[in-house]
Image (cartoon, grey):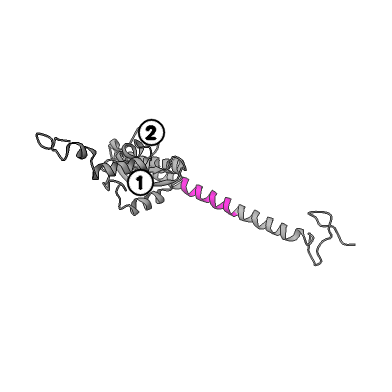
Amino acid sequence: MAQPCVNCGREPKAPGRGNKYCVTCKPIMRETLMERERRKLLERNEKQKLEREEVSKKRKTQMNRFAPEGKRYCYDCEDFLPLSRFSSRPGSKCRTCLKFKDHEWMLKSRFGLSKQEYMDILDSQGGVCYICERKPVNRRLAVDHDHSTGNVRGLLCKGCNRDILGHLRDDPAALQRAIDYLHSPPAFDVIGERPVPNGVPPV
């Protein structure tokens, strides 16, 4: 009498030497076994990665023992920098590296963007604000998104993002009126093209 399947216990084992499972359970158990091995491999690789990172971090942190007077080692820059370049926050990163990390975290948490995706959008815009085509001086371009759908639309400077689109509440009709206003000022229809008395006033 054929032995029952060790998985379901209902069907007889598949014919052949060494079979433990029935014809139905055999492919399922094989797939389960492969998935288990794949998961173990991923866990082992992740553990090894964390161990390598920990060793690397410990080695870089120990570099501070060899730091010249008045300097400290940044393990992102991989260089000795003046103490004034570091914040009071714990860790071995200078202010610049911390800002980049904070920006990267903000992109991922608020907009679901990776750093590379942000740079790809910036490159596609030529490194400038899409609307005014000005290059930012002291600030990065802001990520603009549609408040109704949540879709990321592009990168804008603070003025265009807040003072133009934000003030007009993303209303295309208001933007079109602004274009019409510049092409055909309403005052021309009432008083004609009359310049101000003392020339163009300073902006």
Secondary element at tag 1? strand
Query: Which residue does the image show at 35% across and 37% down from the upper left?
Result: 168
Label 2: how many residues lie within 10 Å, few (<14), some (14-19) or many (20+)?
few
Query: Which residue does the image show at 42% across and 46% down from the upper left?
Result: 152
Q: Disc 2 marks which amino acid? A: Arg
Residue marked by disc 1 = 155
Label 1: how many residues lie within 10 Å, few (<14), some (14-19) or many (20+)?
many
Residue marked by disc 2 = 89
Q: Disc 1 marks which amino acid? A: Leu
Q: Is residue 145 visible?
A: yes
Q: Is residue 94 visible?
A: no
Mark closest to the chain's N terminus, 2 or 1? 2
Magenta stretch holds residue 46 = yes
Q: Front-most of 79 and 30?
A: 30
In the picture, the quarter occupied by the C terminus is: top left
Q: Where does residue 159 sit, x and y in percent of width and height? A: 30, 39
User: Range of the magenta residues?
Assistant: 41-54
Q: Where does residue 89 sit, x and y in percent of width and height? A: 38, 33
In the figure, is residue 127 to the left or right of 112? left
Magenta stretch holds residue 179 = no
User: Magenta segment, principal secondary structure?
Assistant: helix
Q: Front-most of 42 and 163?
A: 163
In the picture, the quarter occupied by the N terminus is: bottom right
In the figure, is residue 136 to the left or right of 25? left
Q: Where does residue 3 sit, x and y in percent of width and height? A: 86, 59
Instruction: Give the alpha-carbon distance from disc 2 to disc 1, as whole Å.
Output: 30 Å
**169 relative to 23, above or below:** above
